[in-house]
Image: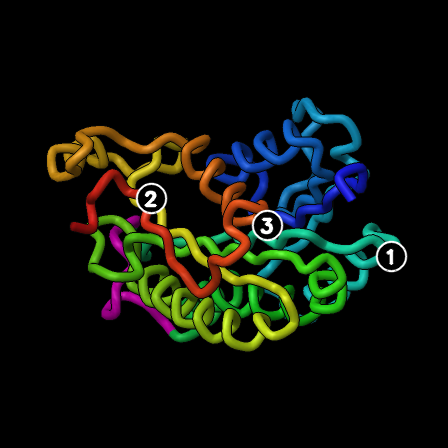
Amino acid sequence: MSNIRKNLLLTGASRGIGHATVKRFSAAGWRVLTVSRQAFSEHCPWDGGEESHIQLDLSNMDALKDGVELIQQKLNGEPLHALVNNAGISPKGPGGERFNTLNSEYVDWLHVYNVNLFAPLILAQGLFEQLVQAKGAIVNVTSIAGSRVHPFAGSAYGSSKAALAALTREMAADFGPHGVRVNAIAPGEIDTSILSPGTEDLVEEIPLRRLGRPEEVASTIYFLCDAPSSYVTGAEVHINGGQHV
């Protein structure tokens, strides 16, 4: 069994936590299928990356159905050992201000929810057989913004991440009898290129007094997809240096 190559499907793979996750799993010998809105970058260093990339807009539910079929084709009958739903969007308000419940429209919320909540569900449903075949794992990436009002992350983002945490519990109950584990990770302030100005001021409120690193998040994702976590399901792991306490 150890000689069988494991397969990971990762959304939001092009930067930050997603990029670090690709590197972590690739280093362990996994084949990583990546999904993002962008085409595969020629600057990405791993072999076979372009053949394993799916360019897909996760906010488009019709395109997502076709995307699932393309993913199945790329798996070519192989099991899917892990699905990591990392893609997430947090738009700004009309003038670049925080996107809140007063300066936003239904269509904007629907766009956020399609990417942050419904896409993870549709992918998990569409790839159910491949996940069961592997007795695989799903990791949903939530956020500290799912449990408190955040100074930068918008209202639609925060509430969609809270819903994703609840969805993780529901999926764990439904997928568990089929041998598939479903967990979530909730990152706090992670040092990536998408940090908002002023984030450094939050460090004073974090018990560990520093930002998290993308590779620290990637290592936790890997743990939740690997044998040491074989009896962990329905959990949400906080990766925030104690910011939640």
Hey, which residue is sitting farthest left in the picture? 204
Q: Main secondary structure of the magenta part?
A: loop
Q: Which residue is mark 1?
A: 77
Q: What is the three-letter code of the residue carrying label 3?
A: Thr
In the rendering, at what x and y percent does residue 96 appear? 30, 49
Q: Determine if residue 113 is in view.
A: yes
Q: What is the three-letter code of the residue carrying label 2?
A: Ile
- SS class of the residue under badge 3? strand
User: Residue 104 lies in magenta, yes or no?
Assistant: yes
Mark 1 vs mark 3, CA separation in Å: 20 Å
Of the image marks 1 and 3, the number of the one nearer the N terminus: 3
Of the image marks 2 and 1, the number of the one nearer the N terminus: 1
Depth check, front residue: 149 or 130: 130
Q: Which one is in front in this view, the residue at disc 1 or the one at disc 3? A: 1
- SS class of the residue under badge 2? strand
What residue is drawn where x is 48% and y is 67%? 117
On the picture, is 242 further left or further right than 76? left
Question: How has the structure been colored for display?
Answer: rainbow
Q: Which one is in front in this view, the residue at disc 3 or the one at disc 2? A: 2
User: Residue 33 lies in magenta, yes or no?
Assistant: no
In the rendering, at what x and y percent does residue 160 appear? 39, 66
Depth check, front residue: 41 or 12: 12
User: Would you place residue 220 above or below residue 68 in this image?
Assistant: above
Residue 239 numbered mark, or none: 2
Of the image marks 3 and 2, the number of the one nearer the N terminus: 3
What residue is drawn where x is 73% and y is 44%? 6
User: Would you place residue 114 above or below residue 2 in this image?
Assistant: below
What residue is drawn where x is 43% and y is 66%? 164
Q: Which residues are magenta?
A: 96-105
Q: Which residue is mark 3?
A: 11
User: Would you place residue 18 above or below residue 97 in this image?
Assistant: above
